[in-house]
Image (tube, rainbow, N blue to C red):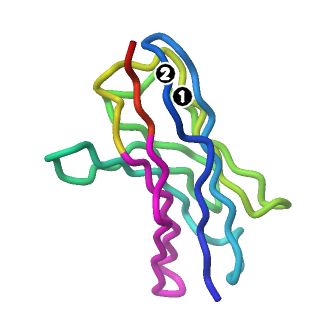
Amino acid sequence: QVQLVESGGGLVQPGGSLKLSCAASGFTFSPYAMSWYRQAPGKERELVATIFSATGNTNYADSVKGRFTIFRDNAKNTVYLQMNSLKPEDTAVYYCNADSRYYGMNYWGKGTLVTVSS
């Protein structure tokens, strides 16, 4: 059974930090590109960051560049999102995604809520 389980969300003040985790199980983790998406109330889901399997290269949305860092631990089947200098506009449900064009598979977690407010 494939599972992506996000954790680490919560309430944080503007300027604060949070670290999200996504634990994967039920599939071979290392070949998959892993991404974090987010969806704010009333808005479409958007891509936040991706880390690729083969190269470890990363991509970020312009809105989070320099503030967020995505990294993975293949030994733990886990991907992380370190979020610093958080802003109220970062408030959203954050979703973990696993994608493999080689296997033709794409998986989603159920999300974790991040609220940035004073």
Residue at 71% across / 68% down in the picture? 30
Q: Secondary structure at mark 1?
A: strand
Q: Position of residue 70 (x, y in %)?
A: 58, 40
Please, what is the dominant secondary structure of the magenta stretch? strand
Q: Is residue 67 above or below residue 21?
A: above
The residue carrying mark 1 is 83
Q: Position of residue 90 (x, y in %)?
A: 35, 30
Q: How many marks?
A: 2
Q: Say which of marks 2 and 1 sits in front.
A: 1
Q: Is residue 36 above or below residue 82?
A: below
Residues 59 and 27: in front is: 27
Horizontal relation, residue 116 to residue 71: left or right: left
Residue at 41% across / 31% down in the picture? 115
N-terminal of the pair, mark 2 or mark 1, is 2
Q: Which mark is residue 67?
A: 2
Residues 46 and 92: in front is: 92
The stretch drawn in magenta includes residue 83: no
Marks 2/1: CA–CA distance: 6 Å
Horizontal relation, residue 114 to residue 42: left or right: right
